[in-house]
Image (spheres, rainbow, N blue to C red):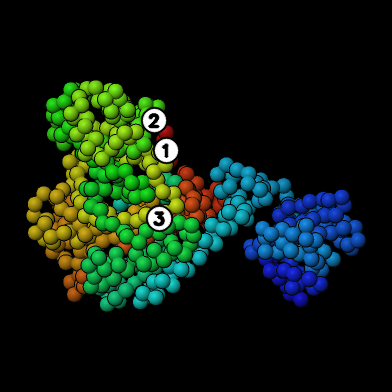
Amino acid sequence: MHAYRSHTCAELDTSNVGQTVRLSGWVHRIRDHGGVLFIDLRDHYGITQVLCDPDSPVFDQVERVRSEWCIRIDGDVKARDASLINAKIPTGEIEVFIRDMEVLGSAKELPLMVFGDQEYPEETRLRHRYLDLRREEMQRNMTLRSDVVASIRRRMWDKGFREYQTPIITASSPEGARDFLVPSRLHPGRFYALPQAPQLFKQLIMVSGFDKYFQIAPCFRDEDPRADRSPTDFYQLDLEMSFVEQQDVFDTIQPVLEGVFEEFGPGHKVDKHWPHISYRDAALWYGTDKPDLRNPIKMQDVSEHFRGSGFAIFAKLLEQDGTQIRAIPAPTGGSRKFCDRMNAFAQKEGLPGMGYIFWRDGENGMEAAGPLAKNIGPERTEAIRLQLGLGKGDAAFFLGGKPQSFESVAGRARNVIGEELGLTDKDRFAFCWVVDFPMYEKDDETGKIDFSHNPFSMPQGGLDALSGDPLEVLGFQYDLACNGYELVSGAIRNHKLDIMIKAFELAGYDEAEVHKRFGGLVNAFQYGAPPHGGCAAGIDRIVMLLANEQNIREVIMFPMNQRAEDLMMNAPSEASSEQLMELGLRVIEQKD
């Protein structure tokens, strides 16, 4: 017999009754029923009930085991009485009577329990992640992650892609976040960087004549953590293709992701139609460039109904350039109680409040109610209702100013309204492509023009588009949103050197700087670069959605905490004086 097991803890059934077996695993739960000891023995695959009474030669040893001890047992498989069958587990029709036992690893008092559904502080869970990962939900999440990655790989190979690996130590590049710098021992005073993405390398792979590339790529960015973003590293499905246009990339990645969500998202409808929404419309309708289309609410510009109206706050606001009044329709939200609740939400978000109108029964039929309705009069109120397609029992909320000052709050309010009114379809994965991103943005304080998205994207209109107002230039850039999260980002690349030089020039990089920072790509483009494009899909976020988790750390094996610390391995840690001297570095203490 094998030294540790003849079966896993999920394999035994009534066909094994009468056999002598060997199992190894962890003591999940112990129950003492009048001198008969029952142990739920757990391994990665499942649970088997084993038992021992005073007739067993190892009864005294079994009495001493505690939760999470790692043990090996030999025993006889017996059928359970019909009344004691546990239909919830595959091994629920049998149990194993212990004849011999070996303690493989004892456990001291546990800082967190593996059995049960107790909640523990995240710091405790991350400090003792090896215990946290033993829990059923975490085992399920990590298995799901592995299966999703394997499925993605199979689907990409089936589409004619091959997987190539790109370097982990490289040069710094502008991907929109801070680099993790790596000092060079052989070249004192100079630094490598961990790649924020394989961006330049995958473009060089296309220049090298490989038609289709993909990789499950590790990426490293020194970012502030969020619930849906790791502060240090993440994995993405990275892909690139030659001789393609934007739609070709969409047609390639859609069946891959659609298939993955159908395979691992049982009980959820997966949308087949992925609409294309311009960045401008996404901001107007949803207040975000990653809209949740499970919520049917679309915001609208209702400025004209308030211009010169009796509601002085909005009327005066609209006299300023670049201002708007937007309405958030709220079907079935037509009660003062709900309107007051949403007004309180706006105040928590730092706004004075939200104006509202709701429609109800009146003496002469349907009437509009609320402070705004009284100020602007019945004709304007009715025009707003007709524009928004609302009726009796419905409401609308209003925010005004320059869109960038209230858009994000409006987007969050739309989400809250959809949730509270039961309009958001929870059992659905709703995808959309957000396209036509602006290439450039202006810093309000400095007035400086910079790239707003990927700097290596092809501008729509090519070189001619770069001769006018940079803020009007759109790129062949696109994101895929699902249920309010950005899952994919990509672009058709700028493969023409003259257009690339001009594009960087508008963002303040002269030609010499471009050659210095991106010399490898610039040199390659002088030797027949093909048109190419691609995208990257976030593995962590995909698994987070499929696992129905709200925090990305629940689907990462060993994540950092909110302060980008690994409490288990004590990272980041101080370097020794010898290490610093070898690298020619000195640490300067920061003063508070």
Residue depth check, mark 3 versus mark 2: number of the one nearer the observer: 2
> Mark 1 and 2 residues: CB-CB less than 8 Å, in contact?
yes
Mark 3 burial class by Cα count in 10 Å: few <14, some 14-19, many 20+: many
Where is residue 415? Give x, y as percent: 37, 41
Label disc, if present, on residue 338 of the rendered structure:
2
The residue located at (84%, 59%) in the rendering is 52
Where is residue 551? Give x, y as percent: 47, 48
Where is residue 43? Give x, y as percent: 67, 62
Q: Is residue 6 above or below residue 458?
A: below
| N-terminal label among 3 and 2 | 2
The residue located at (39%, 30%) in the rendering is 338
Q: Which residue is mark 1?
A: 420
**As rendered, which of 358 and 270 lies closer to the eye?**
358
Where is residue 333? Give x, y as percent: 36, 34
Residue at mark 1 to residue at mark 3: CA–CA distance: 19 Å
Residue 388 figure quarter: top left
**As rendered, which of 201 and 47 lies closer to the eye?**
47
User: Could you tell whether 306 is left or right of 211 in the image?
Assistant: left
| N-terminal label among 1 and 2 | 2
| N-terminal label among 1 and 3 | 1
The residue located at (15%, 30%) in the rendering is 307
Task: Please identify the quadrant where the N terminus is shown.
Answer: bottom right
As shown in the figure, which amino acid type bears the numbered disc 3? Phe
Q: Secondary structure at mark 2?
A: helix
Label disc, if present, on residue 429 of the rendered structure:
3
Q: Secondary structure at mark 1?
A: helix
Residue at mark 3 to residue at mark 2: CA–CA distance: 28 Å
**As rendered, which of 141 and 201 lies closer to the eye?**
141
The residue located at (42%, 54%) in the rendering is 428
